[in-house]
Image: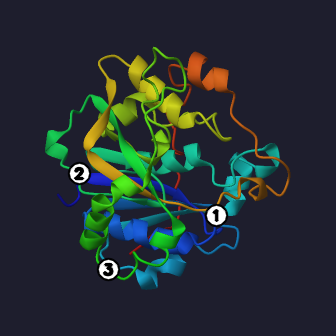
Amino acid sequence: MRGIISVVIPCANDNYGLFLEERAILALDSMISNDYNVILIDWGSPNGVPLLEDIRPFLRSTGLIKSIIVPIEFTQKVAPISSGNQSCCEVLARNIGIRRSTTDWILSTNIDIILGGIETEKLDSNTLYTARKYNVPEIIHLIQLHNMPHEMRYQMLLNNKDKLEQMKYMIDVDPMDKASLIVGCGDFQLAHKTIWDQVRGFEETLTKRSFADTNLQLKVLHSKGHKISVLEEQILFHLDHKSNIHSMNKHGAVLHNDKAKATQLLTKTENSDTWGFQGMLFPTLIH
């Protein structure tokens, strides 16, 4: 149903992984085709031009996409790359979008994910959901997928998912801990607004790479009355790309968050009441 789900996506106009614009067009088309409210958080695009500005001639104008523009002068003040932070600092960017969402359900995902429809009436408001993910090779999504409507595109991927690589179930924290149900959980984390508010979104001290998504699920598990589960009927498709992690930070190596802190010690939020830079105004684009 239109307006029931907000989809929060961090991005930057930096051609991460190459062919970023092509992947973004496919991903965003899948979201507006399902009538999701899309919140793009454009985090410090290095050329000052938001990603949406460059790709909107290739997207239908629905009014469902809002891009919140966080200028590089601000991003380098709160999470400087020179200190080993992510160039697109996901925890801070996602929280900006989550805090400004007005729908009951909020999905945190990424700019290279194709989604199907989600029936919110079947969801439990006390559960954070992840989903199964299949990788779509570049040779398929760059050549075959662009010249068809979303419904046909998604159905074709569903029909051929057994031929694609699936991210397998894996417990990566502790064999007895369900904090991370599947690999790559950060591509799909869906919860009711009450859960996001209770755990105060992603932990804003985890500004480097890795473990922030697992930490989010740990916080949910440790909050009273909440659980996590795989949304069995939702299949998502990741548009595969090259990894240019080593070139992301011109000032040196991209550092990792402290795994022990993120996955064992940090079970309740340290975020302040103003998490997500509540009260700050950022420029926006609507398409």
Amino acid type shown at disc 1: Tyr
- Marks 2/1: CA distance? 28 Å
Image coordinates for residue 166, horizontal then vertical, percent: 43, 47
Residue 205 in sight: yes
- Residue 133 in the image: above or below residue 286: above
Which residue corresponds to the image point at 32% horizontal and 73% vertical from the top-left? Answer: 63
Q: Nearer the viewer, mark 1 or mark 3?
A: 3
Image coordinates for residue 272, horizontal then vertical, percent: 54, 31
- Marks 1/3: CA distance? 25 Å
Which residue is situated farthest in the bottom direction here?
Answer: 57
Is there CB contact under 8 Å for labels 2 and 3?
no
Q: Which residue is mark 3?
A: 148
Image coordinates for residue 214, horizontal then vertical, percent: 51, 31
Q: Count residues near mark 3 (Cα–Cα under 10 Å), then give few for <14, some for 14-19, many for 20+.
A: few
Q: Secondary structure at mark 2?
A: loop
Q: Which residue is mark 2?
A: 118
Q: Which residue is mark 1?
A: 16
